[in-house]
Image (cartoon, grey):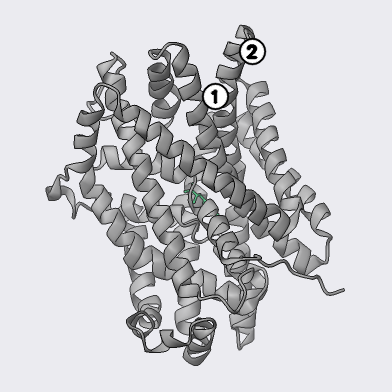
């Protein structure tokens, strides 16, 4: 039985869905904290440079694979294969990407669950359910199971509805909400004492750090995570774009939205930290570095909201809703990778496949939750520091070395016949063949 495939109904639908995947906890939490601990604007400059020169070409490779193949990651890569060896290699790369997406979702869902629990806390406080408010923000097994389950339920609910009615419709609803909340929060934080000091810390570059290997590695890792590379997600989203659309421009627009939102998140988080300091909240750890990671989001910022009296309840609510929305538009893309594979390769009906894959991933989350201190970092590092860069590199190798140059040209020219004579087209295949895999490999080896 041939499975009818979904397709994004409009250019805007694709942009919102792909930007929704790209914009997530990585932008609003990861980017500002990396910036704060890596020399402020020096990190921002390097990040912008690497996002456009390395992550964008690799992102284009994944979108093109999908649009050419019009299928899940494995099938799309296999359509480009000419020998049995290529086909096996295609299976390995595509399937690894799908597993990587599933693993990322298994830990991302737990963190997203925490965001939801912190969003519910002010609601419980306002309604006078104080013991509930205390319970939802205290680390415990039942709390983690409940909120991870809730978040996975929402993710499954959207993906069961398919491409147009699920991914596209919800991305179009949630992304404008996310951008509005982000701008309102920035505007509010800017009115508070200490914000200008934070702004200065964010925007004054310590240029001497620009070539530090640690900074380069963090910036590239951040750019790859942010564009969801190496996970099959952009291959599958690429496969839902009509052949009439100009992929080169669409890819550039999504990259631009992704880096702009990361930049805006920096305008929120870093000034907020200095506002917190002005209120007497400790923002530096004992070794003198800025508190980052979960300490920042779940300790420093809530302490800041507490200093704001009852208004802080609204600000805290808005902030954690923002985080939850960002996580949800990313998590749906992670679930779509494995689901599309099962639907298309094993002829399973979409709703059943979604529930099945969602439950398996939830079970992995439960295994992580049962030993959270060890497993969360282990899975996160395995999937994002090893899995993503290696698989993204293999995708570039596939496009650069296995795909025929004239086939790439044909695909890239669909929806834009002038691209063949443009500067982008002239350097891109060469870039994907040599520069991207080499640069990714260098950064990867350094990070070991
Ligand atoms: N890009 C998302 C973020 O910045 O939070 C994370 C992500 C989404 C990673 C989808 C991988 C993925 F497949």
Q: Does residue 232 appear in this view? A: no
Nearest to the observer: residue 166 or residue 237: 166
Q: Does residue 415 appear in this view? A: yes
State the SS at label 1.
helix
Tag 1 or tag 2, which sits nearer the N-term? 1
Name above or below for residue 49 compared with residue 239.
Answer: above
* Circle 1 residues within 10 Å: few <14, some 14–19, many ≥20: many
* Circle 2 residues within 10 Å: few <14, some 14–19, many ≥20: few
Q: Mark 1 sits on what residue?
A: 118
State the SS at label 2.
helix
Locate residue 360 relative to residue 375 in the image: left or right: right
Locate residue 41 relative to residue 365 in the image: left or right: left
Nearest to the observer: residue 90 or residue 322: 322
Q: Residue at x 27, y 25 (%)?
A: 274
Mark 1, ligand 1, within 8 Å: the answer is no
Count of numbered labels shown in the rendering = 2
Q: How far across and down, in percent of the image, does residue 348 sit? A: 83, 62
What is the C-alpha distance between the residues marked 2 and 1?
Answer: 11 Å
Q: Residue furthest left?
A: 208
Q: How far across and down, in percent of the image, does residue 215 sit? A: 26, 49
Q: How far across and down, in percent of the image, does residue 99 sit? A: 62, 56
Q: Mark 2 sits on what residue?
A: 132
Q: Which mark is residue 398?
A: none
Name above or below for residue 380 compared with residue 201.
Answer: below
Q: Residue at x 24, y 25 (%)?
A: 287
Quadrant of residue 233 within the rendered picture: bottom right
Quadrant of residue 145 within the rendered picture: top right
Nearest to the observer: residue 213 or residue 26: 26
């Amino acid at each position: 039985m041939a499975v009818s495939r979904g397709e994004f109904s409009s250019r805007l639908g694709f942009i919102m869905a792909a930007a929704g995947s790209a914009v997530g906890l990585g932008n609003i939490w990861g980017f500002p904290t990396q910036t704060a601990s890596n020399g402020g604007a020096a990190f921002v400059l390097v990040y912008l440079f690497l996002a456009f020169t390395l992550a964008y070409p690799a992102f284009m490779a994944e979108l093109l694979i999908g649009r050419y193949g019009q299928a899940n990651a494995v099938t799309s890569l296999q359509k480009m294969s000419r020998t049995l060896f290529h086909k096996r290699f295609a299976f390995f790369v595509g399937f690894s990407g799908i597993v990587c997406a599933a693993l990322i979702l298994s830990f991302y869902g737990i963190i997203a669950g925490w965001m939801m629990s912190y969003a519910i806390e002010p609601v419980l406080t306002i309604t006078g359910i104080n013991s509930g408010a205390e319970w939802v923000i205290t680390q415990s097994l039942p709390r983690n199971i409940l909120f991870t389950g809730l978040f996975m339920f929402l993710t499954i609910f959207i993906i069961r509805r398919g491409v147009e009615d699920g991914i596209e419709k919800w991305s179009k609803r949630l992304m404008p909400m996310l951008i509005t909340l982000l701008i309102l929060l920035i505007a509010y934080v800017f009115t508070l004492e200490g914000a200008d000091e934070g702004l200065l810390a964010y925007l004054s570059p310590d240029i001497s750090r620009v070539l530090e290997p640690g900074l380069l590695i963090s910036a590239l890792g951040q750019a790859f995570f942010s564009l969801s590379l190496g996970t099959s997600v952009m291959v599958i989203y690429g496969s839902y774009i009509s052949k009439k659309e100009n992929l080169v421009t669409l890819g550039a627009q999504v990259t631009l939205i992704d880096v702009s939102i990361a930049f805006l998140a920096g305008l929120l988080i870093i000034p907020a930290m200095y506002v917190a300091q002005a209120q007497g909240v400790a923002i530096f750890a004992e070794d003198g570095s800025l508190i980052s990671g979960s300490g920042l989001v779940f300790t420093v910022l809530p302490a800041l909201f507490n200093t704001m009296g009852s208004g802080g309840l609204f600000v805290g609510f808005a902030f954690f809703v923002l985080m939850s929305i960002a996580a949800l538009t990313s998590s749906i893309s992670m679930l779509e990778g494995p689901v599309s594979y099962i639907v298309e390769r094993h002829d399973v009906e979409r709703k059943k496949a979604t529930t099945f894959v969602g439950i398996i991933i939830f079970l992995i989350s439960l295994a992580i939750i049962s030993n959270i201190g060890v497993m969360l970092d282990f899975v996160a590092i395995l999937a994002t520091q090893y899995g993503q860069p290696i698989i993204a590199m293999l995708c570039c190798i596939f496009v650069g070395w296995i795909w025929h140059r004239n086939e790439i040209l044909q695909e890239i020219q669909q929806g834009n016949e002038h691209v063949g004579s443009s500067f982008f087209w002239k350097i891109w295949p060469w870039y994907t063949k040599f520069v991207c895999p080499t640069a990714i490999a260098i950064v990867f080896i350094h990070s070991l």
